[in-house]
Structure formats: C-alpha cells, structure tokens
Amino acid sequence: DTGVSQNPRHKITKRGQNVTFRCDPISEHNRLYWYRQTLGQGPEFLTYFQNEAQLEKSRLLSDRFSAERPKGSFSTLEIQRTEQGDSAMYLCASSHVSVGSYEQYFGPGTRLTVT
Amino acid sequence: AQTVTQSQPEMSVQEAETVTLSCTYDTSENNYYLFWYKQPPSRQMILVIRQEAYKQQNATENRFSVNFQKAAKSFSLKISDSQLGDTAMYFCALANFGNEKLTFGTGTRLTIIP
C-alpha cells in the first residue's frame, strides 16, 4: 500500500491552456474524491466517484472542469481554458465504503498556477 | 447547507504544553461524523481523530482527544504533551451519514515552540 499518489505535483500554465491531473487511489478503495484548496482556506469538495460512476458534482465545478474514473481505478481531472482563478491546490482522496468507515486518505496534491 | 467554523487562524504553544483548538459546525442532519485532519507543511493531510455524532463518549487517540458537545454543535481538539511534530494546519471537517463528502473549516495553524 503506497498511499494516494497525484501527478504532477506542480503545474504552471498560461491562461487559456488546458491541464490534466491524475490521481491514483489506494488500490482497494472504491471511492475517490476531488477537492480544491486555495490559500488560507480549507479544501472544498468538487466531485466524487464510486467505482467508475461519478455520483456528485459541486456547483464549484464549472463546465470547464471534467473528471473521469475509467475502470474504477485512477482518475483524471481536466480543466479547459484555464483562468487565473483556477490557481489552487487540487487534492485527491480515496476511501473504502464500509460500515462505520468514513476515513478519507489524501494524496499530496497538485499545485496549479495559472499565469 | 452545512458549515464548519474555526475561529482561531493561528495558535502557538510551548513544547510539552496542552493546547485546545476550537470548532463549531452547523448541519440539519442528526447523524454525521466529525473529523480533525492535520496538514503538516508541504505534506499531505492525515486524519487525527474521528467522532460519530451518535456516540456520547468523546473520542481519544493517544495524546489527542476531543470535546464533543452535540447540543452546542461544538467539537474541539485537545493536544496533550505537544511535540514539535504537531506543528501543522489543523482542519475540522464534517460528513453527513450516507454522504462521505467532507465540509472543512478554514483551519488553524498551530506552531509548537521548542
């Protein structure tokens, strides 16, 4: 068990470019979450998957954002036509749905800077 | 909508002392979970302690304990015998039963002074 991994760890992009981030959850975890954390704030929920199904999307997730989890394993988060307001840390977390288990394991995050 | 409020942006304490971090929350649900997560500088977030709302007994994990006051919607974290490795951002978070998405507070930056 190597924990949740995210790539890249840092991304600098110019406004208007598209970016894609990857999250690899803990292997036996069937739930995967994306959060966004801006400076001085706590993480905010974006979306989550159970296996390959995307079960909920936050209103924060504009139509420029899309997330996938093909085959219920790794997930990607794509941001199209990036804006400076997209600059943030994007956190991925995973968990295993079981009775009484609500613990989410977080990855190290991808820090996005839009110039 | 549920909210989590942490009113202490920063705190500092001498090593080996005890410190208490405050958290209040609001939810319309009766069944929920409360968490304290720790985010060390440049490292990933890890769970410190968890409390199920239906349990009256306060959770403890070694040097970490909570004071859960359901009626007051208060959930404070006490760190005893603080250590340098406790220096981190601490986030209080809430998840309603049946929906695991976390709602976080804005965090408290805790510094342990040698």
Image: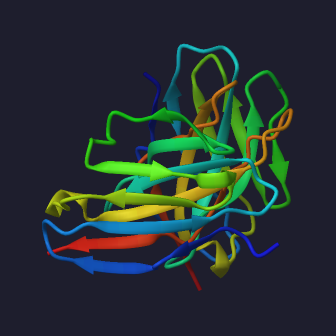
Residue situated in front as seen by the camera: B97 or A25? A25
Please name the residue shown 85% across and 31% down the image: B57
Q: Is residue A25 visible?
A: yes
| Residue sticking out furthest to the front | A71
Q: Position of residue A5 (x, y in %)?
A: 62, 72
Where is residue B15 shown, x and y percent of the image?
64, 77
In the image, A52 versus B94, the foreground residue is: A52
Total tally of numbered discs in the picture = 0
Let me know if residue B9 appears in the view. Answer: no
Q: Where is residue A22 shown, x and y percent of the image?
A: 51, 68
Residue nearest the viewer, comparing B90 with A60: A60
Residue pictured at 50% horizontal, 51% vertical = A68
- Where B3 falls versus B59 (above or below)? above
Q: Quadrant of residue A28?
A: bottom right
Residue A60's quadrant in the figure? top left
Question: Position of A54 compared to B10: left or right?
Answer: right
Q: Please state which of residues B17 and B107 is positioned toward the viewer in this rendering.
A: B107
- Position of residue A56 relative to residue B77, above or below, is above
Q: Position of residue A50 (x, y in %)?
A: 66, 40
Looking at the image, which residue is at 32% across and 63% down? A88
Determine the image quadrant of residue B84: bottom right
Horizontally, residue A98 falls left or right of residue A71, namely right
* Quarter of the picture holding the N terminus of chain A: bottom right
Quadrant where the image shows the C terminus of chain A: bottom left
Looking at the image, the residue that sits furthest to the bottom is B114
The correct choice, above or below, for B76 with respect to B20 in the image is above
Residue pictured at 66% horizontal, 37% vertical: B34
